[in-house]
């Protein structure tokens, strides 16, 4: 069964997310190698014209 996890972020969380990112990416790569992840990635700032750095859109 496929499913999606959608979560809301909190204000001023950029530093915490950046600190956790290397371990998160490593875990995703492991899950992908096991065939347990089909697609992963952020979808921030969709309601903003210019989400900026904290929205991870460049």
Image (cartoon, rainbow, N blue to C red):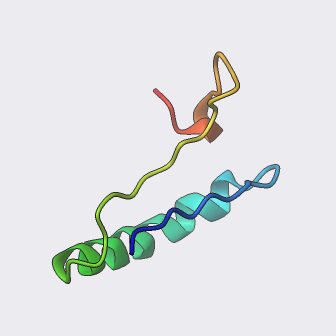
Q: Quadrant of the N terminus?
A: bottom left
In the rendered structure, the answer to whether residue 50 lies left or right of residue 56 reads right
Q: Residue furthest front?
A: 1
Coordinates of residue 33 in the picture (x, y in percent) = 17, 78
- Total labels: the figure holds 0
Image quarter of residue 19: bottom right
Residue in the image at 65% along x and 64% along y:
16
Q: Choose between 18 and 49: the one closer to the eye.
A: 49
Which corner quadrant of the image does residue 2 belong to? bottom left
**Camera-side residue of 25 and 4:** 4
- Pick out the residue farthest to the top: 49
Residue depicted at 33% across the width and 58% down the height: 39
Above or below, 3 against 1 in this view is: above
Quick check: 14 left or right of 37?
A: right
Image quadrant where residue 47 sits: top right
Residue sticking out furthest to the left:
33
Residue 57 drawn above or below residue 24: above
Name the residue furthest right. Answer: 11
Q: Measuring 46% from the left and 26% from the top, which residue is drawn there?
A: 58
Residue drawn 20% across the image and 83% down it:
34
Q: Position of residue 14 (x, y in %)?
A: 66, 52
Please say if 58 is above or below 32.
Answer: above
Position of residue 21 in the picture relative to residue 30 (left or right): right
């Amino acid at each position: 069964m496929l499913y999606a996890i959608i979560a809301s972020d909190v204000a001023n969380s950029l530093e915490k997310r950046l600190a956790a990112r290397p371990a998160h990416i490593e875990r995703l790569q492991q899950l992908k190698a096991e065939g347990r992840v089909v697609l992963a990635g952020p979808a921030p700032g969709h309601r903003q014209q210019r989400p900026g750095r904290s929205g991870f859109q460049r």
